[in-house]
Image: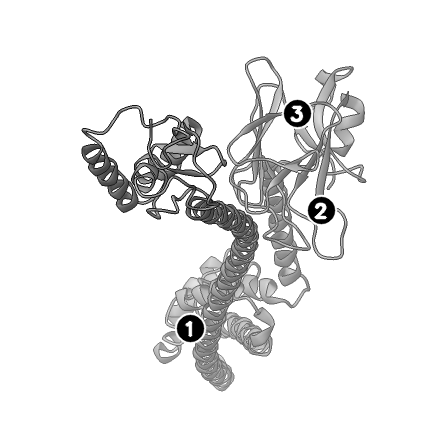
Amino acid sequence: MGEPGSLVTGGRAGDRSWCLRRVGMNAEWLLLEDGKEVTVGRGFGVTYQLVSKICPLMISRNHCVLKQNAEGQWTITDNKSLNGVWLNRERLEPLKVYSIHEGDHIQLGVPLENKENAEYEYEVTEDDWERVYPCLSLKSDQMMEKNKGLRTKRKFNLDELEGSGAEGPSTLKSKISKVSCEPGQPVKSHEKGEVAGQLNEYLDPKLTCLQPSGKALGAHVYPVPAKVVELQHRKQKASNPSASQSSLELFKVTMSRILKLKTQMQEKQIAVLNVKKQTQKGNSKKIVKMEQELHDLQSQLCAEQAQQQARVEQLEKTFQEEQQHLQGLEKEQGEEDLKQQLAQALQEHRALMEELNRSRKDFEAIIQAKNKELEQTKEEKEKVQAQKEEVLSHMNDVLENELQCIICSEYFIEAVTLNCAHSFCSYCINEWMKRKVECPICRKDIKSKTHSLVLDNCINKMVDNLSSEVRERRVVLIKERKECSVGNDKDSIGTIHPDREGTVI
């Protein structure tokens, strides 16, 4: 991008400077000046303006900020940029300060499709000032001054081009300024002032009213009509002066003819005066003839002045048409600028929508993963629930089949085990033994009964996990059986006398 303008090399010889070296290029390096904040973006007011030639919206208006912390360490901050700032291939969080060190890789924006690297990639480096200086990029204010100088130079070249040529509009302006088109003023001359003053005495009064104005013979300087001067200034400001070139050429020829006729008229007046002085009362015919010639010249001058006035009106009309044309062009240019701004805004909107779509896809992927994980957890929970229900069902089966008294079809209450290893409720087996002293299941003689505390504890714990109706029913049964067993012998476990079958001792 050229030399960095106002940067001074003399006072920094031998120093080492920090900079962001553009990867793969020996130009457009970004200088990190000690104690100064460096801003990078595509907008105005930043230290370094980066305008992408491939994708203009890749760099945000104020993309990132680089500055030193209290310890003098350089840091970088992503200023909420659209396409992000990447430090060593990892994207930075917006508005969070990160320290950078020599050799770190900084990437602004993301690579475009079918490209491996981004357009703006830098490497943090510290090097000698003599090596860094030729590769530095221009700052934003230096770029503006350079562009302003180029515009001024181009304007001067256009002005010189318009004024070039002996017969161009500028030359014509100088000629116009020497000619007056208003008759009725006395003739003035630096060299023959007295002669010109005596003309008014000897000439016919009819002729003196047609005398031209200005300075005759020698340096002729005539006042310029205000209309013509204003028209010339407007014509020079027009964007396309060649459009009325033919009219200006014709106007120039007309003014030259007027100047020539005025010169001839002055010569005739001087000649008439000289003849009158010489002859006094001489040949009057010659004087009349010369006066007639002078009158003819003045008539011709008036006609030329009328033509010149018509030319001026034509030029004014042409100028108005060109001015209207320029206004139309300016309006079209404004509409074109508005279209460009709208296109740029639309492009930014599209980029934002693409970013939002990418974020939405990421969120959808996360949600799908969470849903899948939730479904797996739900399936596992259902499996555990099924296993639990299976265990409960199995437990119910065990309770119903193995822990129920065959006499009352209820869960064992104060279970006792006979000598044949079958178990019954204490109340139920006592009532049974009043009729028969044999096992209701195997029909063996009952010789002994033993309380089974293990069965009682197991049944009580299992019943606690069953429904409230089952628990309440068990409590009622226990209460009823205790009431019925009052008055019976407390020692219900004993042996049977061998001589008396069915009698409990």
Instruction: Name the residue tied to disc 3.
Output: 100
One can see residue 178 in this view: no
Label 3 residue SS:
loop
Q: Nearer the viewer, mark 1 or mark 2?
A: 2
Identity, as a three-letter code, of the amino acid under mark 3? Ile
Tags 3 and 2 touching, CB below 8 Å: no
Mark 1 or mark 2: name the one nearer the start of the chain. Answer: 2
Which quadrant holds residue 433? top left
* 282 to 274, vertically: above or below: below
Q: Position of residue 87 (x, y in %)?
A: 66, 33
Say left or right for 144 vs 224. Answer: right
Instruction: Name the residue tied to disc 2.
Output: 118
In this rendered view, identify the residue nearer to me: 73 or 442.
442
Q: Residues within 10 Å of mark 3 (few under 14, many from 20)?
A: some
Tags 1 and 2 touching, CB below 8 Å: no
Identity, as a three-letter code, of the amino acid under mark 1? Gln
In this rendered view, identify the residue nearer to me: 454 or 295.
454
Residue at image point 63% right, 67% down? 168
One can see residue 454 in this view: yes
Instruction: Name the residue tied to disc 1.
Output: 211
Residue at image point 47% right, 82% down? 307
